[in-house]
Image (cartoon, grey):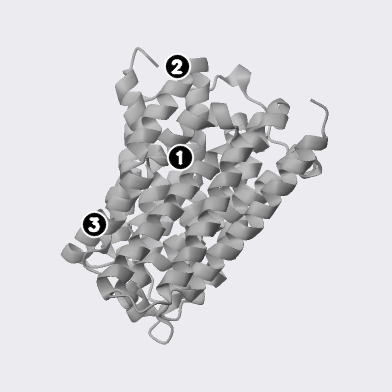
């Protein structure tokens, strides 16, 4: 690899693969009002399902892509995923009904799982130890810029060529990734290191993981934290548009908040060694319960429109920040006892949490009624349940031998 691709180029390519998910979700946000008006005029809220349908497909795909890439190699899985993604984007572009767009988005999510999941495996194939951690950190730092820029890119594409053209931009993005990878990156998994794909092994891994109390609880809490994030993502554009009448400035606010909340990973890195992963998650959820409860109370007062908007921006930032603190820690908690099946466990954890989070977020998002109530109560409920599960996890750990 080193002979054909420099480390800087490799990191840029990996970051672009990571970015497939964020670009596919966040760039759609400015398009939701137009899609709802054109394809679901009787119930514009249903346009939010364009986000959760993609997440659902991605979660299902995550279950299979890692183990399949262990069996056939990394590049074939990325190619197959990209082809699915491109075909689904074309179908969504040509669709005349919301139902067809939603079906295409599920398939698009299945395809996007390939580059996102397998990119991590490619890093693991080529690097190890601190160098691997360094490359992942740099790639993720670049990746955090994508959620900040994606709504602005989406808004720009819509302004130039309409909402359907966003699906054309997805096709171009995927083509750039696979052409770049195909030309510059050799296959990273040698044939002698491949392992056959066996579904019974995956079923066995699921059973083993859910039999372990700490792993089981961490997956459930990760599901709830992802549910909080996806619920905010599905409702955030209507909140800016309908409640605060700021649809035009929404992409800029979203980008600013994404950049600010991206510092959560820096705070977590500074504290997690001293505090511990479980306490970091418990404190983050407890803090979010207090903040969301305060937001619900203050929003009942007769605030000026500017103060009401500032309150929501603050709360949105804390929700994104909480997600940044909790996700990695919960994943690490679940993976710690599963070292003997690490690759399979990573796929299973990611898949189960993502699918269940989409199933939770979709109906909550459809409850949007022109007020903050469904969003605040939905997120508060998920945080309270998650906090209770983390406290229970602490009690279980205290009963275990040192």
223 relative to 103 in the view: left or right: right
Q: Which residue is mark 3?
A: 252
Whether residue 173 is visible to the viewer of this picture, yes or no, is yes
Q: Which residue is mark 1?
A: 115
Q: Earlier in the sequence, mark 1 or mark 2?
A: 1
Q: Nearer the viewer, residue 97 or 124?
A: 124
Residue at image position (67%, 51%) is 220
**Number of dots carrying numbers:** 3
Give the SS element for disc 3. Answer: helix
Q: Which residue is mark 2?
A: 131
Give the SS element for disc 2. Answer: helix
Q: Residue furthest bottom?
A: 42
Q: Badge 3: how crowded within 10 Å, few (<14), some, or many (20+)?
A: some
| Quadrant holding the N terminus | top left
Q: CA distance from mark 2 to mark 3?
A: 35 Å
Q: Earlier in the sequence, mark 2 or mark 3?
A: 2
In this rendering, the answer to whether 221 lies above or below 312 is above
Asked if the residues shown at circle 1 and circle 2 are in contact, with their CB atoms under 8 angstroms apart, the answer is no
Q: Badge 2: how crowded within 10 Å, few (<14), some, or many (20+)?
A: few
Q: Nearer the viewer, residue 332 or 379?
A: 379
Give the SS element for disc 1. Answer: helix
Whether residue 178 is visible to the viewer of this picture, yes or no, is no
Residue at image position (71%, 31%) is 338
Q: CA distance from mark 1 to mark 2?
A: 21 Å
Residue 299 disc label: none
Q: Position of residue 10 (x, y in %)?
A: 35, 25
Q: Badge 1: how crowded within 10 Å, few (<14), some, or many (20+)?
A: many
| Quadrant holding the C terminus | top right
């Amino acid at each position: 690899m080193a002979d054909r691709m420099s480390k800087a180029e490799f990191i840029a390519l990996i970051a672009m693969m990571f970015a497939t998910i964020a670009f596919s979700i966040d760039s759609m946000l400015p398009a939701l009002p137009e899609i709802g008006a054109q394809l679901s005029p009787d119930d514009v809220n249903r346009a939010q399902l364009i986000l959760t349908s993609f997440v659902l497909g991605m979660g299902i795909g995550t279950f299979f892509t890692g183990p399949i890439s262990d069996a056939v190699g990394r590049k074939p899985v990325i190619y197959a995923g990209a082809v699915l993604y491109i075909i689904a984007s074309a179908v969504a572009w040509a669709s005349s009904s919301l139902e067809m767009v939603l079906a295409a988005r599920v398939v698009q999510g299945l395809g996007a799982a390939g580059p996102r999941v397998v990119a991590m495996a490619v890093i693991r194939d080529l690097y190890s130890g601190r160098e691997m951690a360094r490359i992942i950190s740099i790639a993720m730092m670049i990746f955090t810029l994508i959620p900040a820029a994606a709504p602005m890119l989406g808004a720009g594409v819509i302004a130039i060529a309409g909402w359907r053209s966003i699906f054309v931009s997805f096709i171009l993005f995927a083509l750039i990734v696979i052409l770049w990878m195909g030309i510059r990156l050799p296959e990273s998994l040698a044939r002698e290191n491949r392992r056959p794909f066996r579904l019974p092994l995956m079923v066995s891994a699921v059973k083993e993981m859910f039999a372990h109390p700490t792993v089981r609880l961490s997956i459930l809490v990760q599901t709830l934290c992802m549910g909080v994030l996806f619920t905010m993502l599905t409702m955030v554009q209507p909140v800016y548009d309908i409640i605060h009448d700021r649809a035009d400035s929404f992409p800029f606010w979203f980008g600013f908040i994404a950049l600010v909340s991206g510092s959560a990973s820096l705070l977590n890195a500074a504290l997690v060694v001293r505090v511990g992963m479980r306490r970091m998650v418990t404190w983050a959820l407890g803090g979010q319960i207090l903040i969301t409860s305060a937001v619900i109370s203050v929003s009942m007062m007769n605030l000026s429109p500017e103060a009401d908007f500032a309150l929501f921006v603050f709360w949105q930032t804390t929700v994104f920040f909480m997600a940044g603190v909790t996700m990695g820690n919960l994943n690490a908690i679940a993976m710690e006892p599963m070292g003997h099946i690490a690759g399979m466990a990573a796929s299973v954890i990611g898949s189960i949490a993502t699918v269940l989070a989409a199933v939770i977020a979709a109906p909550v998002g459809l409850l949007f009624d022109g007020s903050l109530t469904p969003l605040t109560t939905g997120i508060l409920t998920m945080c309270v349940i998650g906090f209770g599960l983390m406290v229970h996890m602490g009690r279980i750990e205290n009963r275990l031998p040192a």
